[in-house]
Image: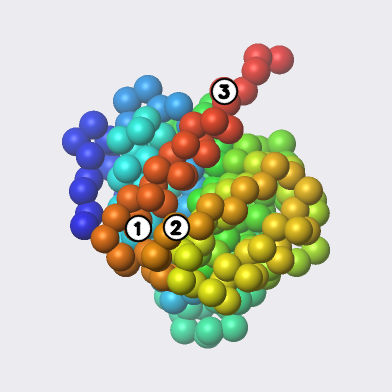
Amino acid sequence: MIDRMGNSAHIETFITVAKGALALPGTLDVPEAPKGLVIFAHGSGSSRMSPRNQYVADRLNAAGLATLLFDLLTEEEALDKRNVFDIALLANRVGAALNWCTFETRVRDLPCGLFGASTGAAAALQAAADHPSVVQAVVSRGGRPDLAKDALPRVLAPTLLIVGELDGTVLILNRHAARSLTCETMIQVVPGATHLFEEPGALDQVVAHATGWFGRHLAPARPV
């Protein structure tokens, strides 16, 4: 399933979190002449090694977008399941990644979007609300945007919520969350797909929708 593109520079790196010396491992892929950067926020029980997120990242690289996948929690933190649902903590880590990218010469001048899955979608949305001048687009895959709660009305970045047709409860929660979003919002339902989009062709539909969304909404920064 993993298909690393030959035209990408695959770099193992560490993101320094602002508080203390905590460093989180990450993987930065930068294609030639990138059009933008997408930072991934993985979901509960997952990591930067998620095969689904890696597959999506590979396809975004092929479409000319740089990607950053990183662990939102240390190994020790991940052992405490409460941290997986601590949206404020996860959003803070996404914010740290956004800050890290402003100093990384390969991507610092690129327009930035966020791609979140499961609880990572809530973290992405809260981070977008907290960094409105930086985040230009958000995509959620099978996410829990409802967990972003009071941050939802503050999100300015155009937001795409991708949900499997057969992921009934999550689809209801996404529709509920969409009513709290005041930004440009779209719910894209993938026919016949369940929560993990494991059905043949389902993840490719996620890729197509995400690529189109980022392609429309990630625009180069205007010169001051």
Q: Who comes first in sequence, dot 2 or dot 3? A: 2
| Location of residue 1 in the rendering, given as x and y in whole percent from the top left corner | 21, 57
Q: Relative to residue 205, is residue 222 drawn left or right?
A: right
Q: Position of residue 170 (x, y in %)?
A: 57, 71
Amino acid, disc 1? Ala
- Location of mark 1 (residue): 202
Q: Which residue is mark 2?
A: 190
Residue 202, x across and y down, in percent: 35, 58
Q: Are marks 2 and 1 in contact (CB under 8 Å)?
A: yes
Q: Which residue is mark 3?
A: 220
Q: Residue at x 51, y 57 (%)?
A: 189
| Residue at the top extreme, as displayed | 223
Q: Which element carries disc 2, helix, strand or loop?
A: strand
Q: Element type at marker 1?
A: helix
Which quadrant does the C terminus fall into?
top right
How dense is the environment of label 3, judged by Cα within 10 Å: few (below 14), some, or many (20 and up)?
few
From this viewpoint, is residue 72 visible?
Answer: no
For the residue marked with disc 3, what is the amino acid?
Pro
Do the residues under discs 3 and 1 have CB atoms within 8 angstroms? no
